[in-house]
Image (cartoon, grey):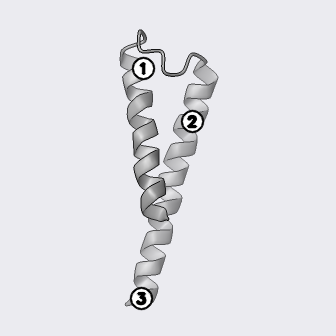
Amino acid sequence: MPHICIILSLDILVLFVIDRFNTAMAFINNDITKWMLCVLTVISIITSLMLYSRQRKDND
């Protein structure tokens, strides 16, 4: 599950960056929503990495 969260979060971050540089793409039209999604994906990546490292430590 952490791997899926990391992959999907990175996908959203890529769309966020593309949308910031190329506004004609207009993936997301609301700036507040863009930043909220950005924060959510970063937090999701951090949480997933922490869970992944904890599971790995428990298995060793």
Quarter of the picture containing the C terminus is bottom left
**Is residue 18 rendered to the left or right of residue 54?**
left
The residue carrying mark 1 is: 20
For mark 2, give the secondary structure.
helix
As drawn, the residue found furthest toward the bottom would be 60
Rendered view: 6 above or below 31 = below
Badge 2 amino acid: Leu
Query: Spatial distance from mark 2 to mark 1, Cα to Cα?
Result: 13 Å
Q: What element carries label 1?
A: helix
Instruction: Indicate the position of residue 58 as horizontal and vertical percent values.
Output: 46, 87
Q: Mark 3 points at which residue?
A: 59
Q: Which of marks 3 and 1 is nearer the N terminus?
A: 1
Q: In this view, does 57 lie above or below 13?
A: below
52 left or right, relative to 43: left
Q: Name the residue under label 2.
A: 37
* Residue sitting at x 37%, y 24%: 18
**Picture residue at 39% right of the left edge, 28% below the top:** 17
